[in-house]
Amino acid sequence: MRRLWGRLTSVNVQKAVWALDEGGFDFERIEAGGAHGVVREPSYRAMNPNGLVPTLEEDGFVLWESNAIMRYVASLSPALALPADLRERAHVEQWVDWQATSFTPAMRDAFWQLFRMAEPDMALVAKSLAASEIHAGILDAHLAGRDYAVGDDFSIADIALGCAAHRWLNLPADRSERPNLRRWYERIAARPGAARVMGAPVG
């Protein structure tokens, strides 16, 4: 029995859910984090001492950190297997980490202020949007002439970047049009594995 702990409004939970769906795995998702609580309970902290989501529990095996979960799922699923070519694999890893360390953190203040605050700090929003535009531009340039983030096949890089792009494109704010990003996003959003993630409310 596989269980994934975490609320679907979390971009990190979305990555894990999409990877598991794309890999063809059955699993139970248990609401945790945010308004759902759970993450401060001793039983949860025994699994994940950080008190964050997601956490994957699988027959006594516990794994946290969304990118680690995606890599683990990719190691189990032929559909998501990392490229055999080590340089291409390194590029998949590069974009997975770039999402977590660059694009999503740049968006954080805009997202939190616009979705979670009754009175948004628009100065923080503007600063965050400006930083995010830089990263959106980097991704848009990279995706020119590409169907997928790396190589000729869908990978966990598309999942990580797709979840970030989903949030970026649904922020209630003006942004520069990025035609390559939009085309790629619409392509991967049409995949069956994306349905649960892309259908969840942003925020």
Image (cartoon, rainbow, N blue to C red):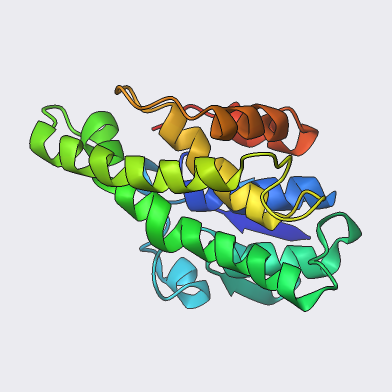
Q: Nearer the viewer, residue 95 or 201?
A: 95
Q: Nearer the viewer, residue 70 or 93?
A: 93
Does the rendering let one see residue 58?
no
Residue at 76% across, 77% down: 86
Quadrant position of the C terminus in the picture = top left
Res 183 visible: yes
Residue sitting at x 47%, y 67%? 44
Which residue, as the protein is rendered here, is positioned at the far right? 78
Residue shown at the point (61%, 70%) measured from the top left: 68
53 and 59: which is toward the camera: 53
Rendered position, 143 above or below 97? above
- At which x and y percent is residue 47? 52, 74
Q: Position of residue 180 (x, y in %)?
A: 58, 33
* Label total for image: 0
Relative to 173, is 120 on the left or the right?
Answer: left
Closer to the camera in the image, 31 or 21: 21
Q: Position of residue 106 (x, y in %)?
A: 31, 50
Residue 97 shown left or right of residue 111 in the figure: right
The quadrant where residue 171 appears:
top left
Residue found at x 25% / y 34% = 116
Image quadrant in which you'd find residue 59: bottom right
The N terminus: image quadrant: bottom right
Q: Is residue 73 above or below residue 26?
A: below
